[in-house]
């Protein structure tokens, strides 16, 4: 994270546009995480095949690189035009004079609070789970499949991550720092890196915590909803890091869930494709309550 921030600030100082500097900073982190996965993997059997890399890279290019720029800006421009046409301004709602570091911390706290409840809802309500199941479909974790997200869910994230802060006039510098934090955390928390976060597991949503969120067992995966921070899980009782053995099988109950890019664009609209989730959910929580 420190090196990614150094790249961002260095390239900005050199006159590179913030968008390109942000992508370069995230790419630096991606290279380092790839090296870490190769040298110190959490599970060697999680190393991806060439076919898995191609499929996940398609999601990465479409929904982690192109869509944030094109889709996010399109929505933002439309709202800005609407506000201008109706003679409304929201710039007074944000402390623009505060240090950028403080503004970024505020953004993290606000976004993670809203995302926590959205993420919780995606797991609890079956129609919403149909879209989120795409993200939970892999049977192994490595940083590239962090981008395996259905575009409808991704657009919902844009509505939280981009639009509100653009409307209140958050500076481009603060937005750039926030997005590098968000991107690097996403890569790392989904990585196959063998790490020990220690006390940081009570602050950040890192790999040790997030692996359990991808467990096939619903009583385990319905925890650790945090995006960058984990503090809301601590406050609302969904923080989960058991002692002893590591996480078991990852993925969905339906082990034959389609994994291709095109097919996963359609799976949220196929009734019952992740068969039995509600039944398993009830059974697992009842069993946990009995214990």
Image (spheres, rainbow, N blue to C red):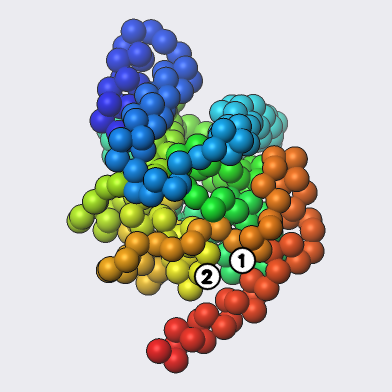
Most foreground residue, 110 or 92 = 110
**Front of the two marks 1 and 2:** 1
Instruction: Decide: few, some or many residues near mark 1? Use Cα within 10 Å; few <14, some 14-19, many ≥20.
Output: some
Query: Horizontal and vertical percent for residue 15?
Result: 38, 8
Q: Residue at x 70, y 51 (%)?
A: 258
Is residue 29 in view from this perspective? no
Is the C-beta separation of discs 1 and 2 under 8 Å? yes
Most foreground residue, 182 or 52 = 52
Which quadrant does the C terminus fall into?
A: bottom left
Residue designated by label 1? 253
Query: Horizontal and vertical percent for residue 147?
Result: 55, 40
Query: Horizontal and vertical percent for residue 217?
Result: 51, 69
Instruction: Decide: few, some or many residues near mark 2? Use Cα within 10 Å; few <14, some 14-19, many ≥20.
Output: many
Quarter of the figure with residue 254: bottom right
Decide which of tag 1 and tag 2 comes sooner along the chain.
2
Query: Horizontal and vertical percent for residue 269?
Result: 78, 56
Residue designated by label 2? 218
Please, which residue is most extreme toward the top here? 14
Q: Residue at x 41, y 10 (%)?
A: 16
Please, which residue is most extreme toward the left here? 199
Is residue 15 in view from this perspective? yes
- Could you say whether the residue bearing mark 2 is in a helix, strand or loop? helix
Most foreground residue, 289 or 74 = 289
Q: Residue at x 58, y 43 (%)?
A: 148
In the displayed structure, 217 sits above or below 104; it is: below
Q: Residue at x 27, y 26 (%)?
A: 3
């Amino acid at each position: 994270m420190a090196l990614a921030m150094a790249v961002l600030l260095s390239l900005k100082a050199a006159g590179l546009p913030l968008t390109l500097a942000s992508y370069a900073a995230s790419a630096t982190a991606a290279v380092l995480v790839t090296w870490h996965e190769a040298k110190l993997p959490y599970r060697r059997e999680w190393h991806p095949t060439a076919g898995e890399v191609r499929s996940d890279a398609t999601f990465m290019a479409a929904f982690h690189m192109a869509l944030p720029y094109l889709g996010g800006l399109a929505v933002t421009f439309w709202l800005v035009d609407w506000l201008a046409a109706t003679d409304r301004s929201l710039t007074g709602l944000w402390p623009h004079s505060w240090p950028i570091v403080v503004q970024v911390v505020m953004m993290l706290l606000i976004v993670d609070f809203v995302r926590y409840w959205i993420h919780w809802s995606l797991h609890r309500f079956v129609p919403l789970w149909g879209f989120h199941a795409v993200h939970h479909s892999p049977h192994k974790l490595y940083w590239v499949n962090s981008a395996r997200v259905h575009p409808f869910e991704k657009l919902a994230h844009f509505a939280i991550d981009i639009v509100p802060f653009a409307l209140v006039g958050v500076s481009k510098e603060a937005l750039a720092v926030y997005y590098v934090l968000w991107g690097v955390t996403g890569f790392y928390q989904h990585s196959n890196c063998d790490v020990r976060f220690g006390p940081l597991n009570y602050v950040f949503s890192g790999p040790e915590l997030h692996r359990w969120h991808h467990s096939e067992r619903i009583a385990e995966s319905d925890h650790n909803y945090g995006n960058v921070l984990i503090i809301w899980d601590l406050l609302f009782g969904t923080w989960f890091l058991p002692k002893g053995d590591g996480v078991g099988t990852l993925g969905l109950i339906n082990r034959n869930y389609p994994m291709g890019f095109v097919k996963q664009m359609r799976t949220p609209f196929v009734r019952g494709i992740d068969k039995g989730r509600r039944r398993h959910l009830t059974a697992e929580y009842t069993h946990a309550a009995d214990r």
